[in-house]
Image (tube, rainbow, N blue to C red):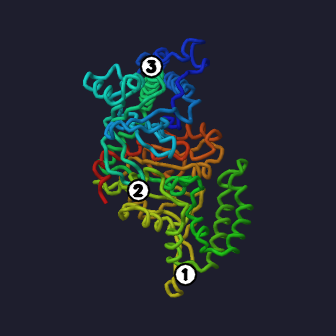
Amino acid sequence: MFFAACMACRHDLPQSCGAPGSLAGDPKAMAAATAAEGRTASFSSTSSAEDDRSERRDRLRSLVHKFTSDALLGVNCTVVDQEQQGAKTEAVYKLDHSVSWLRCCSRSTGAVVAGVLLHSINRLDAFAQLPGDEKEELLELLGPSDCARCVSLGSEQKSRKDLEPKRPTLPVRVLLLLEDSQEVERFITCVEILRLYAAMAAGVDDAAAACAAAAASGELIVVLDFDRTITASFTPDGQRVTSAHGVLEVAKVLSESFRSKTKELFGKYYPIEIDASMSIPEKIPIMSEWYAQVHALMLKEFVTRENIASAVSSCPTICLREGMLELLRCHKAEPAIPVLIMSAGLGDVIEEFLRQTLPFSLASTTLVVSNRMVFDEGEGGRLVDFSEPLLHMFNKSFAFWPEDARALAVGKKRCLLPVGLTTWLEQCGDGLGDCTMVDGLDVETLKVGFLNEKIEERLQQFREGFDVVVTGDGPVPEVCMRAIGASAAGISQQN
């Protein structure tokens, strides 16, 4: 399991993490100890017992987690823009939620001003380690005092045009000024340790590579939820993102009477939904009853397709998760990668949101499996019924896939499965079972969990249930892009 939590370097290892008094504040000792654990965890050839290897991996994970646990807010630094005559931005550096990017955010605006992919860092140098010509260039640009506290990061990543509005193109090389030369040494040690930690994810890397190979041969399918998976959990200004069901209520397409009655139903049925003492088979008929009553109330409202389009366009509190646009582009790969969006919400709202939000049309290999609204064109196009069978939080599984979705899964051997906190809680409650959306589908699955909130409460469950965990409403992790990468090369620039 690759733990992808939001971590930033605090540098000093707690005393409890190693030999008493031997590691705290000593970067070289910390690096040596962690490297030793890493070699044992990832490359041991002396022990063939899986439980021994697992125990060693857990020790390394624990060591790095404790090493970084006190620095969720990041560390102050200054970003130097060499292309702008040494312009400086006061910033904070930290890892992103997926432990894919090392990002520097402006302290005044919060905007990302620089960043490199952790796994692609190919240069990590203090001033003293730089070639002579680069030293001369920096001395002229910064002066001796700043050069003594600078660190240069280089990456193999390629600069690219931004695919989503308001997201900056990041430089391939980053120059940072830290507090002093000792801070530089600690920073370099921390990054090296975290790169070693990333190597512990070899199993995830192998799974991603296997998915990419399957994609290249037409044997990969992507299955994902909508609410808080395709969409974020919170808007940029901190408001909770509206669900597919909630869009119509926010736009006041539905009456005050409807909202009042559904609120009463929520108070009645939601405690049952989250009741850990009840089994899922016990809950299924009750959840079906809840959804049926809500749909019956909605049929009394005058809802049209035009209402839905207007509600989506006017809803300020629904937005894509960062990086999701690039992931959804995978349907343009050759061969095409089927994408199945499975939701207990309203399929018509979901499709309208995607139509209005994405800068490209979805292919026939991208399907939304959800509750469908039936409109009677002879009655002014109003809503008159809902599709059957009713899809709710406890029956989102392969057994309920329609025939066209099943056809897309024929011959598929691998599945990329991103899942949000909502779906996990709905289907698993306090248990440790896997998400059921691909239950019954004979595939090897790479599971990515978005733990948007209740992080401390749910983290251990997510660690055990998912291959990759993204916390804090973070972006789509880079491993997802690698999973579709073999056949997705070049598709990011297509429309």
Q: Is residue 474 above or below residue 35?
A: below
Return the x and y of residue 209 as percentages of the image width and height. Answer: 35, 39
- Label 3: which secondary element: helix
Closer to the observer: label 1 or label 3?
Answer: 3
The residue positioned 35% from the left and 36% from the top of the image is 86
Estimate the spatial distance between the alpha carbons at disc 2 and disc 1, rounded to whole Å. Answer: 35 Å
* Of pointers 2 and 1, the one earlier in the residue sequence: 2
Q: Name the one closer to the observer, 403 or 360.
A: 360
Is the residue under label 1 in contact with that under label 2 (CB below 8 Å)?
no
Q: Name the one closer to the observer, 108 or 491.
A: 108
Q: Is residue 493 left or right of residue 473?
A: left
* Of pointers 2 and 3, the one earlier in the residue sequence: 3
Q: In which quadrant is the C terminus drawn?
A: bottom left
Estimate the spatial distance between the alpha carbons at disc 2 and disc 3, rounded to whole Å. Answer: 41 Å
Work out which residue is located at the far bottom of the displayed protein and give it.
378
Amino acid tagged 1: Arg
Q: Which residue is mark 1?
A: 382
Is the residue under label 3 in contact with that under label 2 (CB below 8 Å)?
no
- Label 1: which secondary element: strand
Residue 358, numbered label? none
Disc tally is 3
Amino acid tagged 3: Ala
Return the x and y of residue 459 as percentages of the image width and height. Answer: 60, 39
Q: Is residue 178 left or right of residue 332?
A: right
Residue 165, numbered label? 2
Disc 1 packing (10 Å; few <14; some 14–19; many ≥20): many
Residue 35, numbered label? 3
Examine the rendering and report whether any part of residue 41 can be seen.
no
